[in-house]
Image: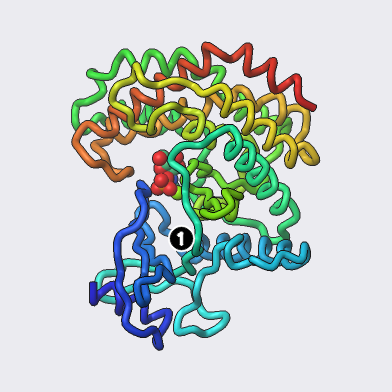
Amino acid sequence: MEKLLSIVREFLPSLPDAQVRPLGNGLINTTYVVEVNGEPKYVLQSINTAIFPDVDGLQGNIEAVTSHLRKKLEAAGETDIDRKVLHFLPLGEKEGAKTYYTDPADGKVWRLMKFIPGSVTLSEVTPETALQAGEAFGRFQSDLADINKQLVEIIPGFHDMEFRLRQLADAIKADPKGRAAGVADILAEIDKYAGTMTEADRLRREGKMPVRVCHCDTKVNNMLYDAATGDVLCVIDLDTVMPSMVFSDYGDFLRTAACSTPEDEPDTDKIAFRNEIFEAFTRGYLSSAKSFLTKEEKDWLPLAVALFPYMQAVRFLTDWINGDTYYKIAYPEHNLVRTKAQMRLFEKVMEQMPELKKFVASLD
Ligand code: GN1
Ligand code: MG
């Protein structure tokens, strides 16, 4: 606690007494809220440098994105800017200083951002909030379409399905815990759909599918809503903002938002795909993204709804076979349970694919 406070003071030397408490449930970084006089004021985060070794590149991307969004909000005459875009603090309260601190004692890397007051994340969305989220993510992509800085591909191949399947094949080959044989049935299922699920990667290589700045982690809890009005405030967790195919943000949101359970539901019979959320989110997304979407991008949206649970299953299963080295786990079989839940969601989406395609095609 004292230690965490001393890190906060690297950013804010004049900060009065404060309390630091754990916040959120990310699978990669560790997050705390800093309270002053009982009021949440800042968010302190330790960056997982095993996953983000290029911290300069990471914070460079984030600063480019937040300042670009800030300028757009200013130009639009927005008055509540500090609640609509993240704000990272420079070291020592000095403008232009680095926005991260490396602790010489243990090499851990930290950053501090302003807490957004009066905001909530949703554990369950309704058609209304899904519509707003769709508009907001479409706007996020269109606002970033004219960013003039070339963003670093902070995790190379992040949403590249061919690459994720190669990582799974490597894990099976190494099989350090002898877990591959026990998941043969899941591997066979994954194999069956590999051709369809890597189609977009082929289109991209052939130059038929554009690459744009995307958020790349549009889980439902990475969107803040105004606690009082219910409106979308701000897109958070900008670590993975990088060039990708647009449907990343569309498909990954529905993976969590249109699923009737959390992503690690152990009872797969409870897992259903919520069609009303899919329809509302799609309407919202297309309303703000149609200005820039190409025909190929729009046509691929329904398959992206299946791609993201499939990709997440492949990633969780790879981590299971590798011996749980990537994602934080809460119990030993967690990655296997997550894999099975994502595969079930994938199957549910595939069952409805003709209807999903029909619905997307019906909107212009
Ligand atoms: C990770 O840590 P968090 O929850 O922001 C992961 C995402 C996955 C997600 C699955 C850098 O995100 O890609 O979709 O877990 N982020 C990284 O819950 O790998
Ligand atoms: Mg994340």
Respond yes or no on whether mark 1 lies under 8 Å from ligand 1. no
Along the viewing direction, whichever of 68 and 137 lies nearer the viewer? 137
Left or right of 85? Residue 116 is: left
Mark 1, residues whose alpha carbon is within 10 Å: few (<14), some, or many (≥20)?
Answer: some
Q: Above or below — where is 307 with respect to 130?
A: above
Q: Nearer the viewer, residue 127 or 317?
A: 127
Residue located beneath label 1 in the image? 54
Quadrant observed for ligand 1 in the rendered image: top left
Q: Which percent across, then down, holds residue 103? A: 31, 74
Q: Is residue 343 above or below residue 9?
A: above
Look at 28% across and 28% down and name the residue there.
336
Q: Position of residue 100 (x, y in %)?
A: 44, 71
Specify the quadrant of the image occupied by residue 55.
bottom left
| Amino acid found under the numbered disc labelled 1 | Asp
Question: Which residue, as the protein is rendered here, is positioned at the far bottom?
Answer: 14
Residue 251 horizontal/vertical position (percent): 56, 32
Please tell me in which quadrant of the rendered image residue 353 appears. top right
Instruction: Residue at 57% x, 60% y: name it.
Output: 61
- Residue lying at 78% horizontally and 40% vertically, measured from the top left: 292
Residue 106 versus residue 49 in the image, above or below: below
